[in-house]
Image (cartoon, rainbow, N blue to C red):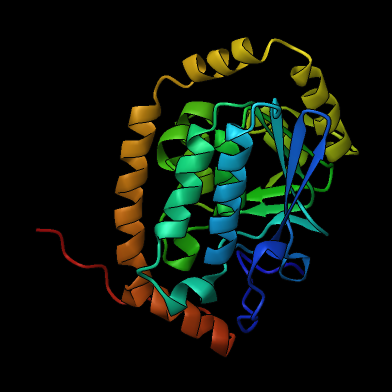
Amino acid sequence: MPPHPSSDAPLSDDTGPDLIAVERTGHVTIIRMNRPHKYNAITQDMYAALAEALLAADRDTEVRAVILTGSGAAFSAGNDLHDFALDPDGLAPVQQFLRAIAGIAVPLIAAVNGLAVGVGVTMLLHCDLVYADPAATFQTPFVDIGLVPEAASTLLLPQLIGARRAADMLLGGRKLTADEAAAWGLINEVSAAPLEKAITVGTALAAKAPGAARNTKTLSRSTNRAVLTRMREEETAMAAQLESAEFTEVLAARRDKRPPVFPPRPTTP
């Protein structure tokens, strides 16, 4: 059974560029999260590598579309909680990735294979087109694990699917099937072969005027300043939650294989 919402096995020693794989097909760059034995749960090293790959693709004048996907049975199981628990102050690689994915001017396509959890969902809000296989699922159970959403998802998800549905996902942790995600507008289309579909679409985009495509995307994302402001607000809240008794209790409950017991809610001034 895939981990929920991220790997809870002991932290492995896998580091370095092999945590992602980058390839080119024509004018299309494919960036693949490459930690399949952990369902592509993202470590801080992976965030740094993903950020650099996105920035490099955006700088490369021969690249006209970028595809994000995952290796193995999952797109991404979200953050590797154990990695972040080791260094709760080390949010810089996450911030680099989120600013890179929010700021990339080249068209960005996601091919979702299998489950997408947490940041595996919220990163999709910064993609221009999203295709998913029929077995894909989408879930943002941040509150369930004592954390808060990131990637400006508290701003972008309500804009994309509506406030009520966003609350169902962000507060309730509702898991969507691929068909539900398409019906709600979270993804463009369900495809039996999402990567092949993304490559076909990316190749078609690459044949169009690249300057016009970049300018159209930039104009379509004219609320970028609000996105960056919300990201900073979420990062402040996330840093506090990573050091909170609630998050500590979640990790202890996972270790002990029991339901978490949360302390009383702090009183508000």
Q: Is residue 59 left or right of residue 249?
A: right
On screen, residue 194 above or below 76: above
On screen, residue 208 above or below 257: above
Q: Position of residue 63 (x, y in %)?
A: 70, 29
Q: Quadrant of residue 111?
A: top right
* Residue found at the far bottom of this picture: 256
Q: Would residue 194 be seen by someone viewing this image from the given angle?
A: yes
x 60%, y 64%: residue: 5
Q: Is residue 176 left or right of residue 218?
A: right
x 55%, y 44%: residue: 122
Q: Quadrant of residue 254?
A: bottom right
Q: Position of residue 218 (x, y in %)?
A: 50, 19
Q: Residue 225 versus residue 55: which sits nearer the camera?
A: 55
Q: How many marks are shown on the rendered structure?
A: 0
x 86%, y 34%: residue: 191
Q: Quadrant of the N terminus?
A: bottom right
Q: Would residue 43 be seen by someone viewing this image from the given angle?
A: no
Q: Is residue 36 left or right of residue 155?
A: right
Q: Residue 151 versus residue 147: which sits nearer the camera?
A: 151
Q: Quadrant of the C terminus?
A: bottom left
x 30%, y 47%: residue: 233
Q: Position of residue 81 (x, y in %)?
A: 53, 71
Q: Position of residue 235 (x, y in %)?
A: 35, 53
